[in-house]
Image (tube, helix red, strand yellow):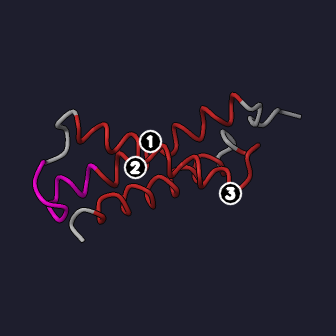
Amino acid sequence: MDTWLPIVIQLVAGALGGNLAGSRGQGSGMGATGNTLAGAAGGLGLAQLLQLLGLGAGGGALDVGSLLTSVLGGGVGGGVLTAILGAVMGGTRKAT
């Protein structure tokens, strides 16, 4: 359980961050499923990178530092990747 908990938190936080970025218009061209998948991938990637760089407490999965790194890194990573993919795919909203 200690091994999978941070990964699940990172995926969920990334999916939330991706959907938030998509609802703000930066990833709206991909739809809800695309935003969720891109967000989950970005969240997992950035949170894992932060932990590899030593920015998350290296303790167990229930350590406060590890949980914060998983939640914040997951949410930010999910939002950023969704926004980047939305811009590349031309999904940004145009003013009318």
Amino acid type of disc 1? Gly
Disc 3 versus disc 2: distance between alpha carbons?
17 Å
> Split into 4 quadrants, where in the image is the N terminus?
bottom left
Instruction: Count neighbours of disc 3 (C-alpha within 10 A) and say few if under 14, some if 14 to 19, many if 20 or more.
Output: few
Mark 3 / mark 1, whichever is N-terminal: 3
List x then y, in percent, for residue 47: 34, 45
List x then y, in percent, for residue 83: 60, 37
Q: Secondary structure at mark 3?
A: helix
Query: Which residue is denoted by mark 1 in the rendering?
Result: 77
Disc 1 versus disc 2: distance between alpha carbons?
5 Å
Image disc number at residue 60: none
Q: Please, which residue is most extreme toward the left here?
A: 59
Query: Which residue is denoted by mark 3 in the rendering?
Result: 33
Give yes or no for contact between labels 1 and 2 (Cβ–Cβ under 8 Å). yes
What is the number of callouts on the image?
A: 3
The span shown in magenta is: 58-69
Q: Nearer the viewer, residue 55 or 24?
A: 55
Query: Which residue is denoted by mark 2 in the rendering?
Result: 74
Query: Disc 3 or disc 1, which is closer to the eye?
Result: 3
Amino acid type of disc 3? Thr
Disc 3 versus disc 1: distance between alpha carbons?
17 Å
Q: Is residue 96 left or right of residue 14?
A: right
